[in-house]
Image (cartoon, rainbow, N blue to C red):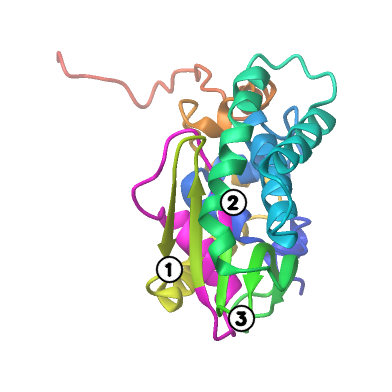
Amino acid sequence: MTNPFIRHGIEHLSPSTLNTWAAQPAIVVLEKLLKRRGNGVSMAALRGTASEAGIVAGLMDPHMDQVECQDIALREFDRLCGLSPDPKRLKEREGIPGIVAQGLLALRPYGIPSQTQGKIVHHFPSVPVPILGYYDLIFRDSGVLVDIKTQLRLSSEISDAHARQVSFYLHGTDLEGRIAYVTPQKFGVYRIEDPKAGMNELLNIAHRMERTLAVSDDPNVIAAMMTPDYGSFYYSDPLTKQHAREVFGFQDQPENPAVRDNGDA
């Protein structure tokens, strides 16, 4: 018998999918099981991808001028956005030069990365499909793996989701983990203190997701178990919210005559 993940068309997991399941499982059901997706990657995510391109270029060539690194990032952002009419496009683009500058300040002291954007696949006996992800940077000489998170306001500490993600990258290595939070004005580089605990949390989420999917082979039955929070940023894309309301939308149910409020009786 195939496992619940395979029965629902999920051939592998990722830290991102598992973190989303922990935060807002309805989104995973909507996108992975029912194939109801929105308009694609957000402007904030594209800002992050483009900024990282400029930062990595400057890390690989420590003599590259900062302005050139910023130009690389801006060109990449424009390429990724195409002709998108998203009103957030300009605001996110404006933050890129500062993010690149701060990212270089944060990470050039670690030296030249030995590996960038590497794929990691782990097979765990308790999870019937592989888990895969992509790390940002490894500095072998420093013994450090770094994940870059771009923001417009600086986090004061590592989020639980980010800790789980980087703990996955560290699993089976002797590297230390760092998360570099980078904004247009400043940066903070924080150490993953207990990667074993983060990895265990991620596996716990996978086990709970598996048990939920095992309830039925019908994705609509799984969807009926979900309660979306439309105020979450996961529903910031209008098309995603529209799909969610069509699938989960709270519609009036016919009255069951056997169940009535007799509070005034």
Give the total number of marks visible in the rendering. Answer: 3
Query: Considering the numbered disc 1 on the image, is that residue within a helix, a strand or a loop?
Result: loop
What residue does disc 3 label? Answer: 141
- Residue 78, horizontal then vertical, whole percent: 80, 28
Quadrant placement of the N terminus: bottom right
- Identified by mark 3, the residue type is Asp
Q: Which mark is residue 192?
A: 1
Label 3 crowd (10 A; few <14 / some 14-19 / many >=20): few
What amino acid does circle 1 point to? Ile
Q: Is residue 186 visible?
A: yes
21 left or right of 265 in image: right
Which region shows up in magenta?
A: 147-176
Above-or-below relation of 166 to 141:
above
Q: Which residue is mark 2?
A: 104
Q: In the image, residue 89 lies at what x, y percent?
A: 67, 21
241 lies above or below 133: above
Q: Nearer the viewer, residue 51 or 220?
A: 51
Amino acid at the residue labelled 2: Leu
Q: Residues within 10 Å of mark 1 (few under 14, many from 20)?
A: some
Secondary structure category for the residue under label 3: loop
Considering the numbered disc 2 on the image, is that residue within a helix, a strand or a loop?
Answer: helix
The label on residue 4 is: none
Q: Residue at x 31, y 21 (%)?
A: 260
Left or right of 253? Residue 125 is right
The residue at 45%/69% (across/down) is 198
The answer to which of marks 2 and 3 sits earlier in the sequence is: 2
In the image, 23: left or right of 81? left
Instruction: Write the residue at 57% across / 25% down.
Output: 236
- Tag 3 near tag 1, CB within 8 Å: no
